[in-house]
């Protein structure tokens, strides 16, 4: 009796398994029809992908990929015949096809009971995927332009990931695919917008050597490390960025800010000197050296380097603004030490000295305003203080209105 029951159980399991395999074949047959019912085919294969009897069979995933391939072909046929077609469906079918074929390949690479690998799917599937790989970029761009960064990232990341997949080893994409760094840049950009910092750090290295976008990819990587609180890697990425892209001010500026905020002025100054040794007339490096002296309260040296900056670049508004600021600071520092007694013989002389500082500051702030009238933070507070202290009624009234506008 037990043997009979056991046999019945085996027959039941076999029939269930056969039923699932039959559904997989039925799904493929439907997809291959002249007018396929894709909803039915997808429902059948979805069930098989979840069923324990068929979900570990690479053939199931191969059919799932085939269905997506057929969806894509039908949409493209409509496009060719100038009928209405769904562009996003075209791209999403390609993405899903890649997902299914990659899983198929993974399962097909598992050795059998004899330890042998018989992957009969790789050759044909990789050829299909190669044909449609470009559409991963197109799909990513369309979603990116729609500001759907999560969806865009799925396309870009798949494009990058398959570049190093064993299915495409012979293609040598990592060396030969000249578009790959650009796609990696957009992947890091989409990930940065999502604040997905691990993904920024995963794909950033693919783009960091590209002449056009490498510096921006490294910006995102530096920001990712900083956001994760990894100061050591953040600083290391900034240093690496300076070496690779010395003309891109992001890395140098942030590194100097780090040293300055951490009161590591010796290290900051040494770094600034090293960069100036390589490029003595670089206005940004000169400005930064002035900025360091400024923060160290060595105002004479700061004035010297800010003035060197505007000698080379007379339109460097930030240098003009900081020159004005230094003279205002000197006026305030000096005023704090002067007498308040109007009868004191020193009073008139000291007030004249204070006025002199503000008069020296005035043309620099006014030049900053002339150069960048819309960037009020560079000049409005300074001119307000100067016009007030110099008793310039008309000018003060105009700035006062701007301040309260």
Image (tube, rainbow, N blue to C red):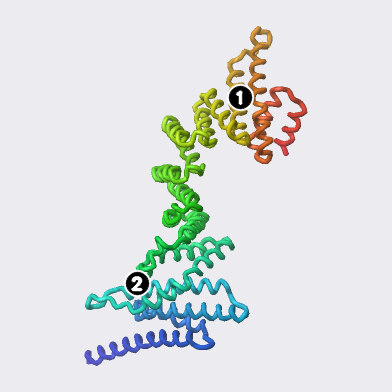
The residue positioned farthest toward the right in the image shown: 394
Q: Secondary structure at mark 2?
A: helix
Cα separation between marks 1 and 2: 69 Å
Q: Looking at the image, which residue is at 71% across and 26% down? A: 387
Circles 1 and 2 in contact, beta carbons < 8 Å: no
Front one among 237 and 212: 212
- Answer whether residue 106 is visible to the viewer in this image: yes
Mark 1 and mark 2 lie on one chain; the one further toward the N terminus is: 2
- Answer whether residue 226 is visible to the viewer in this image: no
Res 27 → quadrant = bottom left
The circle drawn on residue 106 is: 2
Horizontal and vertical percent for residue 401? 74, 35
Quadrant of the drawing holding the N terminus: bottom left
Horizontal and vertical percent for residue 366? 68, 31
Quadrant of the drawing holding the C terminus: top right
Instruction: Mark 2: give few (<14), some (14-19) or many (20+) Cα within 10 Å.
Output: some
Above or below for 129 versus 157: below
Front one among 307 and 10: 307
Q: Secondary structure at mark 1?
A: helix
Q: Looking at the image, which residue is at 50% across and 84% down? A: 40
Locate residue 199 relative to residue 349 in the image: left or right.
Answer: left
Res 304 → quadrant = top right
- Residue that label 1 marks: 327
Instruction: Mark 1: give few (<14), some (14-19) or many (20+) Cα within 10 Å.
Output: many
């Amino acid at each position: 009796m037990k043997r009979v029951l056991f046999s019945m159980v085996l027959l039941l399991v076999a029939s269930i398994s056969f039923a699932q395999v039959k559904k997989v074949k039925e799904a493929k047959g439907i997809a291959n029809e002249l007018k396929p019912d894709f909803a039915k085919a997808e429902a059948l294969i979805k069930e098989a992908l979840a069923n324990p009897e068929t979900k570990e069979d690479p053939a199931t995933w191969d059919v799932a990929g085939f269905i997506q391939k057929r969806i894509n072909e039908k949409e493209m046929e409509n496009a060719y015949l100038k009928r209405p077609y769904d562009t996003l469906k075209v791209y999403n079918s390609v993405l899903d096809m890649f997902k299914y074929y990659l899983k198929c390949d993974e399962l097909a690479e598992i050795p059998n009971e004899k330890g042998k690998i018989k992957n009969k799917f790789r050759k044909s599937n990789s050829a299909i995927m190669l044909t449609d790989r470009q559409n991963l970029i197109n799909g990513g761009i369309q979603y990116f332009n729609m500001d759907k960064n999560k969806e865009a990232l799925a396309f870009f990341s798949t494009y990058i990931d398959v570049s190093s997949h064993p299915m495409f080893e012979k293609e040598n994409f990592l060396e030969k695919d000249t578009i790959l760094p650009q796609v990696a840049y957009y992947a890091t950009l989409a990930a940065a917008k999502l604040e997905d910092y691990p993904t920024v750090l995963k794909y950033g290295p693919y783009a960091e050597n590209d002449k056009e976008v490498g510096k921006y990819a490294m910006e995102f990587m530096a920001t990712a490390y900083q956001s994760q609180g990894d100061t050591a890697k953040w600083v290391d990425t900034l240093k690496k960025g300076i070496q690779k892209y010395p003309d891109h001010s992001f890395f140098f500026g942030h590194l100097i800010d780090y040293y300055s905020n951490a009161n590591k002025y010796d290290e900051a100054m040494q770094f600034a000197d090293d960069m100036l040794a390589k490029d003595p007339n670089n206005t940004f490096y000169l400005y930064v050296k002035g900025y360091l002296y400024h923060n160290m309260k060595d105002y004479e040296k700061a004035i010297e380097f800010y003035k060197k900056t505007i000698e080379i670049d007379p339109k460097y508004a930030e240098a003009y603004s900081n020159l004005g600021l230094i003279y205002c600071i000197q006026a305030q520092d000096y005023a704090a030490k002067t007498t308040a007694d109007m009868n004191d013989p020193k009073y008139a002389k000291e007030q004249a000295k204070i006025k002199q500082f503000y008069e020296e500051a005035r043309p620099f702030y006014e030049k900053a305003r002339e150069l960048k009238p819309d960037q009020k933070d560079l000049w409005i507070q300074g001119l307000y203080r100067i016009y007030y202290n110099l008793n310039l009624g008309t000018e003060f009234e105009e700035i006062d209105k701007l301040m309260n506008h």
